[in-house]
């Protein structure tokens, strides 16, 4: 089951938060190494399972990267809008462009 999570961070902390949420390459690397080993041993049945597992991991990585790209774009939208707006922000609500990251 998948759920959406959201939490609040200070605007200036968003780039470091995005960096912290970037996926590592450990799981996919392990799968690909196992895949290579299975192919070298001509164990094609297990290799096919590894291909399927690699595709799923790539899908999950891609989805996470797309989410983080959206957060980064929302951050830029806020920063650019602040640069072009008048100096006074009284009465202006904060943008909700950057609020959610799927886990």
Image (spheres, rainbow, N blue to C red):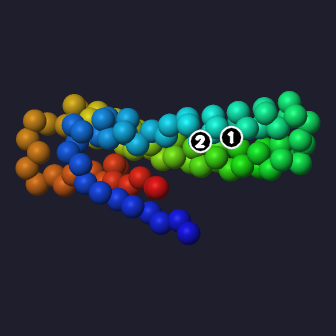
Residue 81, located in which quarter of the rendered image? top left
Give the number of callouts: 2
* Mark seen at residue 27: 2
Helix or strand or loop: what does disc 1 sit on? helix
Answer whether residue 77 is visible to the viewer in this image: no
Badge 1 local density, few (<14 within 10 Å), some, or many (20+)? Answer: many
Q: Distance between the residues labelled 1 and 2?
A: 6 Å
Of 74 and 82, the residue lying toward us: 74
Relative to 51, does residue 5 appear above or below in the rendering?
below
Residue shown at 30%/35% (left/top)? 16
Q: What element carries label 2?
A: helix
Question: Which label belongs to residue 31?
Answer: 1
**87 left or right of 37 in image:** left
Q: Horizontal and vertical percent for residue 19? A: 38, 35
Neighbour tally class for label 2: few under 14, some 14-19, many 20 plus, Cα within 10 Å? few
Could one spot residue 70 in this view of the protein?
yes
91 with respect to 25 (left or right)? left
Q: Do the residues labelled 1 and 2 touch (CB within 8 Å)?
A: yes
Residue beneath the point at 78% across and 44% down: 51
Please tell me in which quadrant of the rendered image residue 38 appears.
Answer: top right
**Residue 24: percent from the left, percent from the top?**
50, 37
Q: Where is residue 1 in the image (x, y as percent from the top left)?
A: 56, 69
């Amino acid at each position: 089951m998948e759920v959406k999570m959201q939490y609040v961070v200070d605007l200036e902390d968003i780039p470091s938060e995005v960096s912290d949420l970037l996926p590592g390459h450990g799981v996919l690397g392990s799968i690909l190494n196992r895949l290579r080993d299975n192919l070298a041993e001509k164990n094609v049945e297990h290799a096919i399972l590894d291909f399927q597992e690699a595709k799923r991991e790539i899908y999950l990585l891609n989805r996470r990267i797309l989410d983080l790209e959206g957060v980064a774009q929302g951050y830029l939208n806020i920063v650019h809008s602040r640069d072009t707006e008048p100096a006074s922000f009284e009465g202006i609500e904060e943008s909700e462009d950057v609020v959610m990251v799927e886990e």
